[in-house]
C-alpha cells in the first residue's frame, strides 16, 4: 500500500466523519437543506473512496486510473460539499462556481472508476 493509498483512506474516513457531523448539524439548523445534501454526498462517497482504494491495492482494477478516480472523488467532495456547507452555515460560498465544479469533478471520478474497471489491470 502506497502513501497515496493511505492518504486516500484517511480522507475517505474524514469524509465519513464530516458527513455524520454535517447530518447532526443539519438537524439543529433551520433551512439547512444544502447542509443535508452535503452530508448525504459525504456519507455516500466515503465508502466509495474506501472501495476504490481496496480495488487498487488488490490489483483488481487499473491501479493508476483507480487512484485518480478516488482522488477526483475526494477533490470533488471538498469543493461540492464544502461549498454547500459554507453557504448553509456562514451564508458565503467557498468561491464562485465551487459546487458546480465539484459536481463535475465527482462525475469525472465516477466515470474514471468505470474506465478503471474496464482497462486491464497490470500485474
Image (tube, helix red, strand yellow):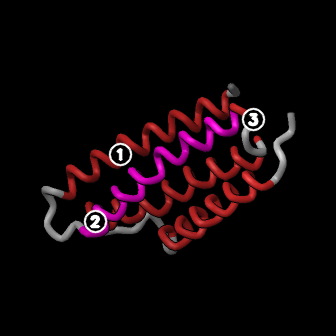
| Residue matched to label 2 | 88
Q: CA distance from mark 1 to mark 3?
A: 29 Å
Quarter of the image holding residue 84? bottom left
* Relative image position of residue 58 (x, y in whole percent): 70, 32
Which secondary structure dominates the residues rendered in magenta?
A: helix
Q: Which residues are magenta?
A: 33-57
Q: Secondary structure at mark 2?
A: helix
The image quadrant where one finds the C terminus is top right
The image quadrant where one finds the N terminus is top right
Q: Is residue 50 above or below residue 31?
A: above
Residue most toward the top?
1
Q: Nearer the viewer, residue 50 or 92?
A: 50
* Relative image position of residue 63 (x, y in whole percent): 76, 41
Magenta span includes 43: yes
The residue that appears at 72% across and 52% down in the rendered structure is: 117
Dot 1 or dot 3, earlier in sequence = 1
The residue that appears at 77% across and 55% down in the rendered structure is: 118
Residue 59 circle label: 3
* Mark nearer the viewer, 3 or 2: 3
Q: Nearer the viewer, residue 6 or 117?
A: 117
| Residue matched to label 1 | 18
Please rate how many residues cluster around mark 3, counting C-alpha atoms within 10 Å: few if below 14, some from 14 to 19, many from 20: some
Please rate how many residues cluster around mark 2, counting C-alpha atoms within 10 Å: few if below 14, some from 14 to 19, many from 20: many
* Mark nearer the viewer, 1 or 3: 3
* Relative image position of residue 4 (x, y in whole percent): 67, 34
Q: Secondary structure at mark 3?
A: loop
Q: CA distance from mark 2 to mark 1?
A: 14 Å
Looking at the image, residue 88 sits to the left or right of residue 84; the answer is: left
Q: Nearer the viewer, residue 109 or 22?
A: 109
* Relative image position of residue 107 (x, y in whole percent): 59, 66
Dot 3 or dot 2, earlier in sequence = 3
Q: Is residue 5 above or below residue 77?
A: above
Amino acid at each position: 500500500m502506497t502513501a497515496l493509498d493511505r492518504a486516500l483512506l484517511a480522507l475517505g474516513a474524514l469524509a465519513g466523519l464530516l458527513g455524520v457531523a454535517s447530518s447532526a448539524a443539519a438537524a439543529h439548523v433551520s433551512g439547512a437543506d444544502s447542509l443535508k445534501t452535503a452530508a448525504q454526498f459525504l456519507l455516500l462517497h466515503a465508502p466509495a473512496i474506501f472501495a476504490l482504494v481496496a480495488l487498487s491495492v488488490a490489483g483488481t482494477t487499473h491501479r493508476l486510473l483507480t487512484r485518480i478516480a478516488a482522488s477526483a472523488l475526494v477533490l470533488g467532495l471538498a469543493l461540492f460539499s464544502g461549498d454547500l456547507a459554507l453557504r448553509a452555515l456562514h451564508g458565503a460560498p467557498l468561491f464562485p462556481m465551487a459546487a458546480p465544479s465539484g459536481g463535475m469533478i465527482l462525475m469525472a471520478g465516477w466515470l474514471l472508476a468505470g474506465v478503471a474497471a474496464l482497462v486491464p489491470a497490470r500485474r
